[in-house]
Amino acid sequence: MNSFGVKLRFTTFGESHGKALGCILDGVPAGLLIDEAFIQSELDRRKPGKSEFETARKEADKVEILSGVFEGKSTGTPIAMIIYNTNQKSRDYSNIKDVFRPGHADFTYFHKYGLRDYRGGGRSSARETAARVAAGAVAKLMLRELGIEIVSGISEIHGIKAEVCNYDYAKESIIYALDPQIEEAQKRVILEAKQRHDSVGGVARVLIKGAPVGLGEPLYYKLDAVLGDAMMGINAVKAVEIGDGVMSARLFGSQNNDPIRREGFESNHAGGILGGISNGDDIVLNVYFKPTPSIFQEQHTVTTNNEEVDFALKGRHDPCVAIRGTIVCEAMAALVIADMLLLNMGSKIEGVVKYYS
């Protein structure tokens, strides 16, 4: 499947080393102000080649809107956006034409389809996420109309974990670090791994502020379930937590419950979601990224003919994919929340009557 969402649905297309990639976003209400500069700024946050902590592949990631916008506003018809690839080096991948990279989707794509685009991973490449960020930027413009904000940052790199979460600081950090006290240690471990031709994993923390009570569809389209689906669909993500996540299993009910007073909840162990429905508190997610599988050390593997070989990869890859991944997490969260807002509009009859009267 290459599509996601119900009322607000998007489809992405394109490959890492193809001519272009892009998305079609359907379900955006007519009349939304489309801030193209903002959309481009979101892509700029995710684009590669900005620092030594990312892949050396430099792409402008210039987005072009093809349809669905007239005189600066959405028309209610599908919004199509395209991003042209300009800095492919397909020759770097000639040595893996018939070889599977350990930890990569090469193996599963080949056995599922009987062929694969080996140039940078083709459709399985994280480059596809540029299209998701473009779609997510439009969703953020919708959320802006309702005062809903989504922020994120890196809370952990290779076990070096943040003690505080300063989202304003993360916006200025080159690695989107949430804790300024450990940022240098996180940078150091990334560069040390890079020098060893290795990679490291990390954790992105996402905060959704201002979401109203009532988002989420029982029983099979719960908000936390769909957020988990959206995050797990991002390349290299291996786990997702809502609120306290796995820590909840280690607590008593008296510790895990969030007491309620007139002004709201006294704590937020639930991460803003109860019974699959938003409770009006901040929605908190932790998204766990594995180390980038494309590393430059010699590894054991097999060929497409199941012959055992040792090989060393060439190319340009992120030493820590979690860094740019945090921007993709924001985009997917925005798309989910916007979709849930549209779905929730018909949950009460008075809302339907008010609209049509």
Image (spheres, grey):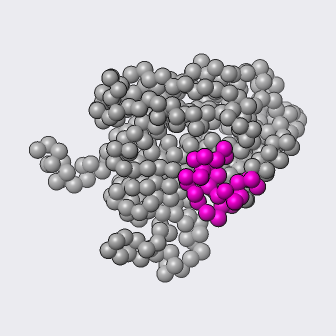
Name which residue lies at 38% across and 44% down. 144
Left or right: 239 with respect to 104? left
Q: Position of residue 52 (x, y in %)?
A: 75, 38
Magenta residue span: 161-186
Classify 137 as above or below 202.
Answer: above
Image quadrant assignment for residue 249: bottom right
Left or right: 26 with respect to 239? left
Q: Position of residue 48 (x, y in %)?
A: 66, 33
Left or right: 36 with respect to 112? left
Name which residue lies at 18% across and 48% down. 352
Q: Reply yes or no: does residue 178 show up in magenta.
A: yes
Image quadrant assignment for residue 97: top right
Q: How many marks?
A: 0
Name the one closer to the observer, 85 or 121: 85
Q: Position of residue 36 (x, y in %)?
A: 44, 29
Left or right: 76 with respect to 39? left
Q: Position of residue 227 (x, y in %)?
A: 48, 51
Classify 202 as above or below 311.
Answer: below
